[in-house]
Image: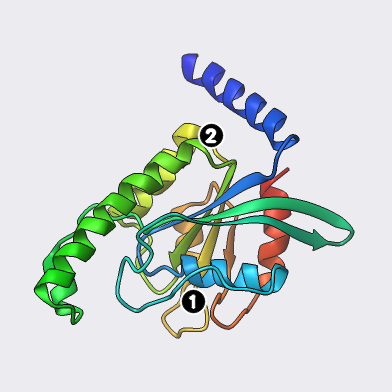
Amino acid sequence: MFNAIRQFINKFFRNIFSKKKNIALGLYGPPNGGKTTLANKVCMDWLGEEMGTVSNIAHETREIQIKEEISLEKNGKVIKFNLVDTPGIATRIDYEDFLKAGLNEKEAKQRAKEATKGVIESIKWLDDVDAVVVVLDSTKDPYSQVNITIIGNLAARDIPVLIVANKIDLKKSSVKKIQAAFPQYEVIGISAKDGDNMDKFYEGLFEVFK
């Protein structure tokens, strides 16, 4: 009963404040799922400039990045939002993984420290976002501890969610596996790198902001 009341209050105040300011759309997911690639695509489509740097090494994004006042127009409708690109969430961060990726020991330890801080900041930002796009690598098993943790946190906070199954340009991609793992949410398959199915993604954003 208490949780139901809390969820109603949270949704009530989100609706009030979303009318007074640009709503905050958070991009969440595990490292290397393509959050920043998607953020760059959205920003290029609607602002003409990219948001951040992309790398094959995990945890390239280690600080919150924000692009303000993005106006998305579709079929005569407009939504304005601030895009929040968050560091990848991980349940385990080991500097030795960065050594294997080619960083030296000093760089690897610093990257692990910054990545851990980034995870903490990502979780804190859940209190400030109005809706979330969860970006998952569609070539990987969706039933991971990280994915379940992220989705569980969002469900507990009653935050509107759209799941993106990214990297559909790759042969091992399976959007159906992600849909089967999280049937309670809409799942849209895209390639943020190639821009495939972005129109469907933008339509999904209008739905999640209802």
Q: Is residue 77 left or right of residue 166?
A: right
The one nearer the camera, 4 or 22, is 22
Give the percent coordinates (x, y) of residue 35. 48, 65
* N-terminal-most mark, 1 or 2: 2
Q: At label 2, which amino acid type do we have?
A: Asp
Which quadrant: the C terminus?
Answer: top right
Residue position for label 1: 167
Residue 175 is at least partly visible in this image: no
Q: At label 1, which amino acid type do we have?
A: Lys
Q: Is residue 155 above or below residue 46?
A: above
Question: Quarter of the image holding residue 83?
Answer: bottom right
Check disc 2: other Cα within 10 Å, few if <14, some if 14-19, many if 20+. Answer: some
**Are the two marked residues, 1 and 2, in contact with CB atoms closer than 8 angstroms?**
no
Q: Is residue 109 left or right of residue 38?
A: left
Q: Is residue 89 left or right of residue 164?
A: left
The one nearer the camera, 110 or 148, is 110
Please report the residue visible at 54 percent of the width from the left and 68 percent of the height from the top.
51
Please report the residue visible at 60 percent of the width from the left and 46 percent of the height from the top.
24
SS label for mark 1:
loop
Give the percent coordinates (x, y) of residue 103. 18, 78
How many marks the image carries: the answer is: 2
Check disc 1: other Cα within 10 Å, few if <14, some if 14-19, many if 20+. Answer: many
Residue 67 is at least partly visible in this image: yes
Q: Is residue 37 above or below residue 169?
A: above
- Checking the image for residue 158, the label placed there is 2
The furthest residue to the top: 1
